[in-house]
Structures are given as C-alpha cells and as structure tokens.
Amino acid sequence: MSIKKQFLKSKPECKVTFKFEKSKDLIPEKVQVIGDFNNWDVNAEPMKPLKTGGFTQTINLSSGDKVQFRYLVNNSLWINDQEADEFINNGVDNVEQNCVLHL
C-alpha cells in the first residue's frame, strides 16, 4: 500500500493518491477508501483496478485538515495503510484503529 500527497499551489487542496496492492495472502476483487471525506459511506465509489491486481484512487482533500480513513476490501475486511501519518482509536472498541493523514 502507498499514499502519495501532492499539495496544489493554485488552491488549498492536497491531491492524495491511495494505492492498494494485492498480496499472496489477499487478492481483492473490490477495494474502497472509506473515511471522513466521504462520511464513512460503505457504498462509496470503488478504487480503480490496476493490471497488477492492485487498486488506485486519487481524491482532492482540503489542505490543513487531518482525515481518518481505512480500506474496505471485498465489502467485509477493513485494512489500515501502514504509511498513514498516525493511527487513532476508532471509538468502536479498544483494538481497532483508523488511519490518519495530515494534510
């Protein structure tokens, strides 16, 4: 997995590209980036599949914000991106955490 941030000079936005790679343990059929920016909507637009078997999506987010997110894989498995800027308890239990990006 990877996260690429590109801060725009023309407006106070950051173009964030999320990339989810398949692994030998997990071959996803559908991946979504779910977070604050789409109101945690599990029906959000899926990421675009890549020829490598991975997925990608680019989202413009407001600079200066902190946003939480997670990947939803195959409509059932929540996965964190280890390249996130930090992790925070998601408030559901004491084990699960959300990824946080500093923009």
Image (tube, rainbow, N blue to C red):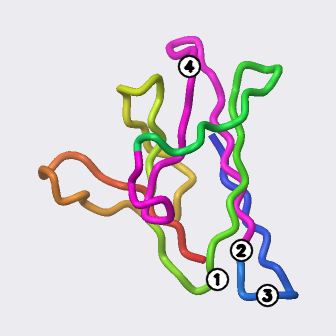
Q: In this view, does 73 lie to the left or right of 96?
A: right
Can residue 81 be found in the magenta stretch? no
Asked if residue 11 is positioned above or below residue 47 in the image, the reply reads below
Q: Callout 2: helix, strand or loop?
A: strand
Q: Callout 1: helix, strand or loop?
A: loop
Q: Which of 96 and 12 is in front in this view?
A: 12
Q: Distance between the residues labelled 3 and 2?
A: 9 Å
Disc with the residue nearer the chain's start (3 vs 1): 3
Q: Callout 3: helix, strand or loop?
A: loop
Q: Callout 4: helix, strand or loop?
A: loop
The disc placed on residue 14 is 2
- The residue labelled by disc 3 is 11
Please provide percent x and percent y for residue 55: 69, 32
Q: In this view, does 10 lie to the left or right of 86?
A: right
The disc placed on residue 63 is 1
Q: What stretch is highlighted in magenta?
A: 14-41
The number of numbered discs placed on residues in the rendered structure image is 4
Q: Which amino acid does label 1 sit on?
A: Ser
Q: Tell me what residue is drawn at x 48 percent, y 59 percent.
A: 38
